């Protein structure tokens, strides 16, 4: 960027719909050996999960969440938990906001799955104060196709690094597209302080440790969101039923990060055109089918109409 960039603007032209530029990645092989190929796939009402994917998703959700969502680990409750997570995965096939999954290895095992939803509202005060309210008890009945808040209330993984891959390479770029297109006001996640029960102080002091990079290494959830640029905007007491988290949930706000890193995130979306360092008084011949979306900083964003 040139020295006079402060007197310039960036003009960004979005395609009519978003598609990731790259869906094939590599993921670390924690059993040793070369990195494994990983692919990102999307599932929604138009492209539903098949039975095999549903059962894999239910299995990794059960392994990671059953004791935290009220299911103990005895055999009977384990079966009930598996049924719940199966129904949860099936429910995703009925909504338009896509579940996003990463598969790895030669036979494409499910590594992680994230269940984003879009909810109604435009500001933090509109965000529900517990996980069951936010998700419709995990059945995603709160999802709104035109909701202006996007959030990720659940991620399940059985391959280390796969959930981080989904956030960095899929969730954030696609959310950046929707935010740039003026379809969103907030980009968030709803997350638990996974190691808080081992801490003797207050939840506020614990979050400060995370912000200062001094939290326990077992604090995988908050550390991950901190790593990717989230701001912990609100702490919800009784936001979940997880004793390890002290029954707290936090709203992780990615909106400032998306605003500050817009061009970088949009570079992961196909057919985005960015013309940088355009003098403020200059216009470009975009055509009649290009609609103005919004201004974010010195970024002037347009979208090709359908």
Image (cartoon, helix red, strand yellow):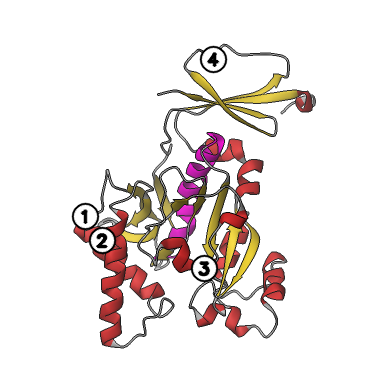
Sooner in the amino-acid sequence: mark 2 or mark 3: 2
Residue at which label 3 appears: 130
Magenta segment range?
A: 159-182
Q: Left or right? Give the position of 17 relative to 247.
A: left
Label 2 near label 1: C-beta < 8 Å? yes
Q: Which mark is residue 50?
A: 1
Sooner in the amino-acid sequence: mark 3 or mark 4: 3
Q: Left or right? Give the position of 213 relative to 268.
A: right
Of 137 and 288, the residue lying toward us = 137
- Give coordinates of residue 146: x percent, y percent: 44, 42
- Give coordinates of residue 60: x percent, y percent: 34, 69
Q: What whole-number distance in Å separates the C-alpha atoms at marks 4 and 1? A: 42 Å
Sooner in the amino-acid sequence: mark 1 or mark 3: 1
Q: Quadrant of residue 83?
A: bottom left
Q: What whole-number distance in Å separates the C-alpha atoms at marks 2 and 3? A: 26 Å
**Few, some or many C-alpha atoms within 10 Å of disc 2 (few <14, some 14-19, many ≥20)?**
some
Of 92 and 136, the residue lying toward us = 136
Of 167 and 246, the residue lying toward us = 246
- Pick out the residue farthest to the left: 51
Main secondary structure type of the part rendered in magenta = helix
Residue at which label 4 appears: 286
3 or 4: mark nearer the eye: 3
Residue at the image point whose x is 69% and y is 25% from the top: 9
Q: What whole-number distance in Å separates the C-alpha atoms at marks 1 and 2? A: 6 Å
């Amino acid at each position: 960027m040139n020295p006079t960039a402060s007197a310039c603007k960036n003009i960004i032209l979005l395609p009519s719909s978003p598609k990731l530029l790259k869906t094939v990645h590599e993921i670390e092989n924690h059993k040793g050996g070369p990195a494994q190929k990983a692919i990102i796939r999307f599932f929604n009402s138009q492209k539903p999960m098949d039975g095999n994917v549903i059962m894999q998703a239910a299995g990794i959700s059960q392994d990671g969440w059953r004791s935290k969502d009220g299911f103990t680990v005895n055999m009977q409750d384990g079966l009930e938990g598996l049924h719940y997570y199966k129904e949860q995965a099936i429910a995703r096939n009925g909504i338009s906001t896509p579940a996003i999954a990463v598969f790895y290895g030669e036979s494409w095992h499910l590594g992680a799955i994230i269940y984003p939803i879009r909810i109604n509202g435009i500001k933090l005060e509109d965000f529900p104060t517990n996980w069951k309210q936010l998700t419709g008890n995990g059945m995603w009945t709160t999802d709104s196709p035109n909701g202006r808040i996007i959030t990720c209330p659940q991620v399940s993984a059985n391959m280390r690094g796969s959930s981080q891959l989904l956030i960095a390479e899929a969730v954030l770029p696609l959310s950046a597209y929707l935010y740039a297109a003026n379809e969103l006001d907030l980009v968030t996640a709803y997350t638990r302080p996974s190691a808080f029960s081992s801490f003797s102080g207050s939840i506020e002091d614990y979050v400060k440790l995370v912000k200062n990079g001094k939290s326990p290494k077992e604090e995988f959830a908050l550390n991950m969101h901190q790593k990717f640029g989230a701001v912990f905007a609100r702490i919800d007491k009784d936001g979940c039923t997880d004793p390890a988290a002290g029954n707290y949930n936090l709203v992780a706000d990615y909106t400032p990060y998306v605003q500050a890193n817009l061009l970088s995130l949009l570079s992961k979306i196909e057919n985005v055109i960015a013309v940088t360092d355009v003098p403020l008084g200059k216009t470009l011949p975009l055509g009649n089918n290009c609609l103005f979306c919004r201004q974010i900083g010195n970024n002037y964003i347009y979208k090709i109409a359908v």
